[in-house]
Amino acid sequence: KNQVEQSPQSLIILEGKNCTLQCNYTVSPFSNLRWYKQDTGRGPVSLTIMTFSENTKSNGRYTATLDADTKQSSLHITASQLSDSASYICVVGGDTGTASKLTFGTGTRLQVTL
Amino acid sequence: DAGVIQSPRHEVTEMGQEVTLRCKPISGHDYLFWYRQTMMRGLELLIYFNNNVPIDDSGMPEDRFSAKMPNASFSTLKIQPSEPRDSAVYFCASSKRLQGGNNYGYTFGSGTRLTVV
């Protein structure tokens, strides 16, 4: 069964600090891995998308890494801001060429405090 | 681009009543998805359409759920009769192929928070 597991479930950090969120997946076939940010009361918004051949992808203060051999990904947030408080969802796409076959993690809830 | 538009944003209804959720996808997107999100299970795919045709409805929990896409700019998700366990946030997303590759980009709406009492 295709699965995406994220850790930690929740995290509290001080503003200005860095943090790293983890994602392990068992999805076959593998096409791409995405990280989404979901603010409270809003829909998920795409941060990064990486294919099999990509090891890292950045979007501002967000940097995602992918190790396709160990089936692990991480999302690193640099110099966190209060607006980074949200849920971060790891999503694995399992089929090239179609829009279906996404497997979602249950997310990491991040709270950035003063 | 107004994004994916869902209505209503919030819906509170009594058990047994019919509920209709609405979605307007982004123009030009050829896929439309309905998801349900709960704290326990995260995001679950209910059904998706390609070019207005339902492709996979295996995620629809039971016959009380139905979805239609009469044209490229509108879709509905109906629950009849509703039950308290249907309480969740329902998201609509639309998708198109990303430029230069085989992957698809997804845009989610803001969701409808359904509470069945």
Image: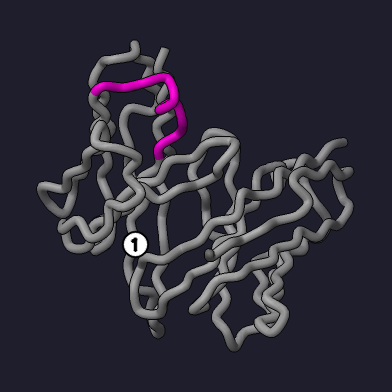
A34 left or right of B89?
right
On the image, the x and y values in percent for residue B55 come to: 23, 60
A29 left or right of B27?
right
Q: Is residue B2 visible?
A: no
Residue A113 to residue B4: above or below: above
Q: Nearer the viewer, residue A87 or A83?
A: A87
Q: What segment is highlighted magenta in the picture? A: B81-90
A94 left or right of B41?
left
Which quarter of the picture shows residue A64?
Answer: bottom right
Dot 1, how many residues are within 10 Å of its Cα: few (below 14), some (14-19), or many (20+)? Answer: many
Q: Is residue A31 magenta?
A: no
Secondary structure, mark 1, is: strand
Q: Nearer the viewer, residue B90 or A39?
A: B90
Q: How is the image coloured?
A: one colour
Instruction: Report the residue at 45% width, 34% height from top.
Output: B89
On the image, the x and y values in percent for residue A55 come to: 68, 83
Question: Which chain's residue wears label 1?
Answer: B
Mark 1 residue type: Ser
Q: Is residue B11 visible?
A: yes
Q: Nearer the viewer, residue B78 or A64?
A: B78
A21 left or right of B72?
right
Instruction: Report the residue at 80% width, 51% height from top.
Output: A80
Q: Is residue B87 magenta?
A: yes
Q: Which residue is mark 1?
A: B95
